[in-house]
Amino acid sequence: MPTLYEKYKKEAVPALQKKLGYKNVMQVPKILKVVVNAGIGRFVKESGFIENVEKSLAKITGQKPVRTRAKKAISNFKIREGQEIGVTVTLRGKQMYDFMEKLVRITFPRVRDFHGISPNGFDRQGNYTIGFKENVAFPEVKMEEIEKIHGLQVIVNTNAQTKEAGLALLTELGFPFIRSTK
């Protein structure tokens, strides 16, 4: 079975070139990076929770996460400047394609009541954001090992110029989008 990168090179690039009307192969959009974020939210006061989230993201992505800190204090959320509020991982290259292949082929089918992902998660530049309410959809996370279930966010960063080009790219790579009923 071909990997996602091979599928992109052999199938997606010619299909996108034809579909989007590009004359040059270099005009075809590609995925630059995948960012996986997890905020610790209301558990910010619990000491071991951020380590739990960090271990979980390390298992999911295969890379050590970086802790993020609050840039400014927000009294309503009881956040102080410099306080650790989440973890993030940036994937590029082979790890990125391996993660996306696992996301499309294994993780999405494991999500409860999954009928496809919404095409509304694109921004104007063709980047796509997916939110997961639970980290248990990923095959590396075992229910017995986790103390608290947390959500996470996956951002697929592309060099597409429009929403339509980003949607066409991810559709060609096998992302299971819901057909819009407009």
Image (cartoon, rainbow, N blue to C red):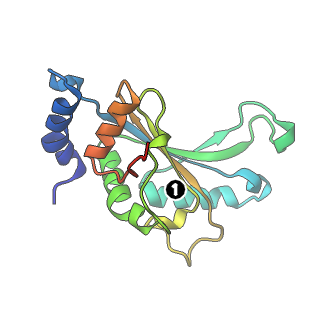
Say which quadrant the C terminus sits in: top left
Q: Residue at x 80, y 54 (%)?
A: 45
Say which quadrant the N terminus sits in: bottom left
Q: Nearer the viewer, residue 16 or 149?
A: 16
Q: Is residue 140 left or right of residue 19?
A: right
Q: Which quarter of the figure has residue 144?
A: bottom right
Which x, y percent locates residue 99?
36, 53
Which x, y percent locates residue 69?
68, 38
Which x, y percent locates residue 112?
50, 69
Residue extending farthest to the bottom is 144
Q: Nearer the viewer, residue 171 or 129?
A: 171
Q: Nearer the viewer, residue 6 or 119?
A: 119
Residue extending farthest to the front is 182
Q: Residue at x 17, y 38 (%)?
A: 15
Q: Nearer the viewer, residue 68 or 109?
A: 109
Residue extending farthest to the right is 75
Q: Residue at x 38, y 50 (%)?
A: 179
Q: Is residue 6 left or right of residue 48?
A: left
Q: How many marks?
A: 1
Q: Is residue 50 left or right of residue 132?
A: right
Q: Is residue 7 left or right of residue 154?
A: left
- Label 1, residues with CA under 10 Å away: few <14, some 14-19, many ≥20: many
Q: Residue at x 62, y 66 (%)?
A: 149
Residue type of the residue flagged with mark 1? Leu
Which x, y percent locates residue 48?
70, 61
The residue at which mark 1 appears reads as: 57
Instruction: Name the element at disc 1.
Output: helix
